[in-house]
Amino acid sequence: MKFFLSISALILYVVSYGQRNYIYGLVRDSTTQEEMPGVHVKNINAGLLTSANINGKFKIPAQMGDTIVLSSVGYKTLAWIVEENWFDIEFTTFSLPINTIYLEEVVVDKYPEYERFKDQLTQMDIEDSTFEVYGVPRVVLSKNASLNASLSISGPFSMMHNAFSKRAKEKRKMRQLLKEQDAQEKVRQKFTREWVAESTKLGGDTLTNFIDYCNFTQEYLINTPEYIIHEDMMALLPHFLEEYKNKY
């Protein structure tokens, strides 16, 4: 049954893809009217991605009603709904406006000017304008809502806000702490004192000294399979016993 459903889904995808023809586009800066190379072009409905060439031109499979999204660093991300006449013309022209954010003038110098700048950034309510559909009123998102990650663009303003924000710093510290705790837990599960004792038949101070002698790093223990750790450990055992005998 699962195999039949998979084959059916594949056939539907091929049929749907086969119905799409190429549309040809030319991307320009809305202010200077210059061609824009390297612009990312995505057909959301078909899940297809391409980019504009050095002359600002691109082609991508589409059918009427598909949503085409154009994005480039420093410009607003806009979307167009494919129209029927696009297939009858040589190139459809798309214009992208610069994504400009105006900030109140702040002098960054000695304290307290720096603190004032920092406070203003962390207290401001940032308006989300990363994704707009051409010809459609922009939807205002709530503070807790977020856009699809594939359509998001982080600008220098949000980078500064993230750098100064106390909450953002606390989140970064928490992620780092959880990452370290997860790594330590993996090490404890893989390289335990009981496991070493069972493998080497050592005990007491001799066992403790041998574990120190192995000196396996946390990165090595996390990324190395257990059987290889066992082989490396057992290879060190004769050398340890020889040194241990001479030392004690």
Image (cartoon, helix red, strand yellow):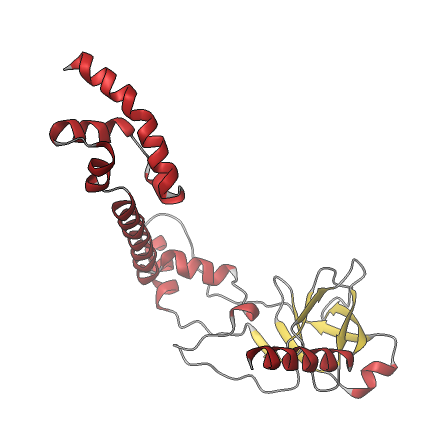
State which quadrant residue 27 falls in.
bottom right
On the image, the x and y values in percent for residue 89 come to 87, 80
Quadrant including the C terminus: top left
Taking the image as drawn, is residue 207 in sight? yes
Q: Relative to the observer, which residue lies in front, 241 or 155? A: 241
Left or right position of 181 against 7: left
State which quadrant residue 166 falls in.
bottom left
Q: Relative to the observer, which residue lies in front, 110 or 64? A: 64
Left or right position of 177 against 146: left
In the image, residue 218 sits, relative to residue 167, either above or below, namely above
Number of callouts: 0
Direction top: furthest residue: 246
Q: Relative to the observer, which residue lies in front, 226 or 201? A: 201
Q: Relative to the observer, which residue lies in front, 62 or 125? A: 62
State which quadrant residue 217 falls in.
top left
Identity of the residue drawn at 48% across and 83% down: 140
On the image, the x and y values in percent for residue 79 come to 65, 78
Left or right position of 76 against 176: right
On the image, the x and y values in percent for residue 13 come to 68, 79
Identity of the residue drawn at 81% across and 61% down: 55
On the image, the x and y values in percent for residue 226 come to 35, 42
Quadrant including the N terminus: bottom right
In the image, residue 44 sits, relative to residue 231, either above or below, namely below
Taking the image as drawn, is residue 219 in sight? no
Identity of the residue drawn at 52% across and 73% down: 148
